[in-house]
C-alpha cells in the first residue's frame, strides 16, 4: 500500500493531560534516593606491540579499528593508568540515585563459583546519565566481604574494597564495627594451633581510607609475616558496574505553558555487582 496513512490526532484540549510530572519525579528521587559515588569510565589506549589479538574482546575494538598490521591489541599489564584492565575511571563525584533490587545472588558451588553476579537497578537524574562500564558505589549501604590476602612487605595494605564502618543497633546500645573476623597462617600457609586470630585495635587498625595497617601487630609480633596468608571479614559499600545503560526518556507536557514540550525524565540503568575476584583498581 503506497498511500499515506495519517494517524488520528485528538483535539488539542486533550493535550492538557500530563502522564509524568518531571518535577515530582525529581523530588521523589531526591527524597528516596541514596548517596552514591559515580565514577565515569573511558577506554585506555595502552597495548603491547607484537602480541596476539586473540581474546582481546570489545575493550580493544576502538584501537583495533585504527591499528596497522602487526600492531598488538593486547592490554599492557604494566599500564600505570588502567593497571592492565583496559578501562580508566575518572571524574569521581557524589550523586543521589535510587538503588532498587540490590542483590548478591549467593550460589554456593554454582556454575560461576561461590558467587553469581548480583544486579541492581540504579535510577539517576537525566543530567547524570550512566554509561557502559561506569562504576557506582552506594555510600548509604554496607555488605559483608570475605577476603584472603598474601601479606606483603608493606605496612599498610589495601583489600579488594575499602573497609567502612557500620553502626549496629544492639540491645546494649549502638556499636560501630568495621571488621568482623581475621585469622592468619604461618609461612607454610597452615593455621597455627594458637595465636592465629587477629583483633582490630590490637593486632591491626583500619586507616581513614579503609586500608589495613599492620603497625600494631608488627610491633607486638602478632601480625602475619611477609609471605604468610590471612583471611579477613569486613564491611564495605556495595560496588556496581553498569552493564545496561538506560535509554534517555522524555515526556511531552503542556502544563502551565502554551505549547507542549518534551521534558527529560530520570534514567534507569542495570548494574552488575562487583564481588568475587573483583575490586577497585
Image (tube, helix red, strand yellow):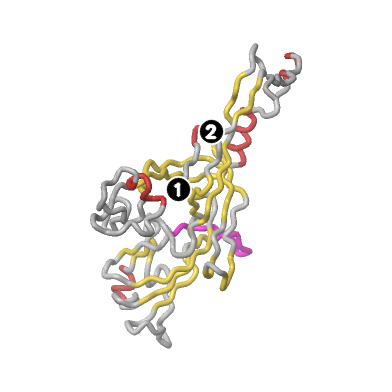
Residue 105 location (% of width, % of height): 59, 62
Q: Which residues are magenta?
A: 162-175
Which quadrant holds residue 225?
bottom left
Residue most extreme to the front: 1
The residue positioned 24% from the left and 57% from the top of the image is 50
* Front disc: 1 or 2: 1
Asked whether 157 or 81 is in front, the reply is 81
Q: Is residue 186 depicted above or below 86 in this figure?
A: below
The residue positioned 54% from the left and 53% from the top of the image is 141
User: Is 52 left or right of 278, judged from the image as shown?
Assistant: left
Residue most extreme to the bottom: 193
Which quadrant holds residue 21?
top right
The N terminus is located in which quarter? Answer: top right
**Which label belongs to residue 126?**
2
SS at mark 1 in the image = loop
Residue 196 location (% of width, % of height): 41, 81
Q: CA distance from mark 1 to mark 2?
A: 18 Å
Asked whether 31 or 152 is in front, the reply is 152
The earlier-in-sequence mark between 1 and 2 is 2
The residue positioned 37% from the left and 61% from the top of the image is 211
The residue positioned 52% from the left and 44% from the top of the image is 35
Q: Is residue 119 depicted above or below 269 in this figure?
A: below
Asked whether 128 or 112 is in front, the reply is 112
Assess whether mark 2 and mark 1 are in contact (beta carbons under 8 angstroms). no
Residue 260 location (% of width, % of height): 64, 17
Q: Is residue 162 depicted above or below 8 in this figure?
A: below
Q: Which residue is mark 1?
A: 133
The C terminus is located in which quarter? Answer: bottom left
Q: Residues within 10 Å of mark 2 (few under 14, many from 20)?
A: some
SS at mark 2 in the image = helix
Magenta span includes 12: no
Amino acid at each position: 500500500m503506497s498511500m499515506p496513512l495519517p494517524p488520528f490526532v485528538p483535539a488539542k484540549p486533550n493535550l492538557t493531560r500530563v502522564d509524568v510530572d518531571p518535577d515530582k519525579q525529581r523530588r521523589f528521587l531526591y527524597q528516596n534516593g541514596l548517596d552514591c559515588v559515580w565514577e565515569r569510565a573511558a577506554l585506555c589506549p595502552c597495548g603491547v606491540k607484537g602480541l596476539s589479538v586473540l581474546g582481546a574482546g570489545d575493550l580493544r575494538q576502538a584501537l583495533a579499528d585504527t591499528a596497522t598490521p602487526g600492531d598488538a591489541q593486547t592490554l599492557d599489564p604494566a599500564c600505570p593508568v588502567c593497571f592492565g584492565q583496559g578501562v580508566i575511571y575518572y571524574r569521581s563525584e557524589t550523586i543521589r540515585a535510587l538503588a532498587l533490587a540490590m542483590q548478591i545472588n549467593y550460589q554456593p558451588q554454582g556454575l560461576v563459583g561461590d558467587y553469581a553476579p548480583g544486579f541492581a537497578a540504579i535510577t539517576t537524574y537525566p543530567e547524570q546519565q550512566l554509561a557502559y562500564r561506569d562504576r557506582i558505589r552506594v555510600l548509604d549501604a554496607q555488605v559483608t566481604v570475605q577476603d584472603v590476602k598474601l601479606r606483603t612487605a608493606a605496612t599498610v595494605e589495601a583489600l579488594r574494597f575499602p573497609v567502612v564502618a557500620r553502626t549496629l543497633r544492639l540491645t546494649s546500645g549502638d556499636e560501630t564495627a568495621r571488621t568482623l573476623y581475621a585469622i592468619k597462617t604461618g609461612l607454610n600457609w597452615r593455621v597455627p594451633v594458637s595465636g592465629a586470630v587477629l583483633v582490630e585495635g590490637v593486632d591491626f587498625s583500619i586507616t581513614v581510607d579503609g586500608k589495613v595497617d599492620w603497625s600494631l601487630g608488627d610491633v607486638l609480633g602478632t601480625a602475619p609475616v611477609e609471605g604468610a596468608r590471612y583471611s579477613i571479614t569486613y564491611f564495605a559499600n556495595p560496588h556496581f558496574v553498569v552493564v545496561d545503560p538506560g535509554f534517555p526518556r522524555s515526556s511531552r507536557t503542556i502544563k502551565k505553558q502554551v505549547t507542549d514540550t518534551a521534558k527529560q525524565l530520570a534514567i534507569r540503568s542495570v548494574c552488575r555487582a562487583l564481588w568475587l575476584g573483583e575490586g577497585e583498581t
